Image (cartoon, helix red, strand yellow):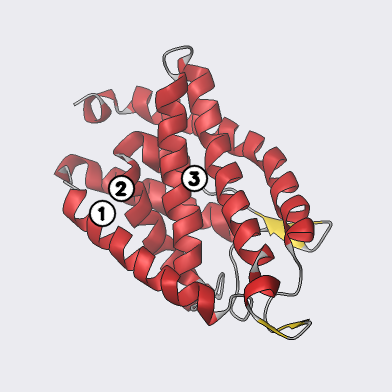
Amino acid sequence: MHIPDGFISPQTYIPAIAISAGLLTLAYKKIELDVEKIPFIAGVSALSFVMMLIAIPFPGGTTMHLSGVAMIALLFGPWIAFSSISLVLLIQALIFGEGGITSYPINIISIAFVGSFSAYYAHKLLSRFSKDTALFFAGWASIFFSSVLIASVLGIQPLIASDGQTPLYFPFGLSVTIPSVVIPHIFLGIAEGLVTLTGVKFLKKQFRSVFDA
């Protein structure tokens, strides 16, 4: 789901730099770290790092990967999840070439911010009905809504950056990006939902004193 360099126009990534910088500044002000939870935040973030490196090719030219974003958001809060995943994405971009530098702001807004907060609020909305269902759909939402934003950003590139009729950056419009990116991630979201359900329940059961504090 990471967008590489060369796909996104300056008309897109320059405003995204300002937005992502503002969000990271806000996260810094809102986060209050519990010393006991720091090793767990690092551990789950490392798991997310590995999960996102395992990219699964899918017909249509896209790749998919699990993220672990929802687990972090539900265990530690969406602002910590946003900050942690932003750091994960930065390391992946700089060291492993997974996602671009110019597209980094878009990647953290879509995967880290939208993923974290869609998971958090999906869980909050559904937990009154069923805790297990809420956990599952939190994971699903973190993948689905991130993919919608990624597909939309890619799909508008021919409209906002072209030389006459020739796109200067990503060449395919929304009619291509929405089905090719979003539809596979609808199904990937099922796997993410199951990982979130089992992961959150396991950690809360094994480390009840930490997460119930």
Where is mark 1, residue-wise? 27
Q: Nearer the viewer, mark 2 or mark 3?
A: 2
Give x and y (percent) for residue 36. Answer: 18, 40
SS class of the residue under badge 2?
Answer: helix
Where is mark 3, residue-wise? 68
**For this rendering, which residue is in front, 179 or 58?**
179
Give x and y (percent) for residue 144. Answer: 60, 43
Q: Are marks 1 and 2 in contact (CB under 8 Å)?
A: yes
Give x and y (percent) for residue 211. Answer: 27, 29
**For this rendering, which residue is in front, 26 or 191?**
26
From the viewer's perspective, is 139 left or right of 54?
Answer: left
Q: Residue at x 65, y 34 (%)?
A: 190
**For this rendering, which residue is in front, 48 or 5?**
5
Upstream in sequence: badge 3 or badge 1: 1
Amino acid type of the residue that numbered disc 1 sits on in the rendered structure: Ala
The image shows residue 204, relative to residue 101, as above or below, that is above
Q: Residue at x 48, y 46 (%)?
A: 115
SS class of the residue under badge 3?
Answer: loop
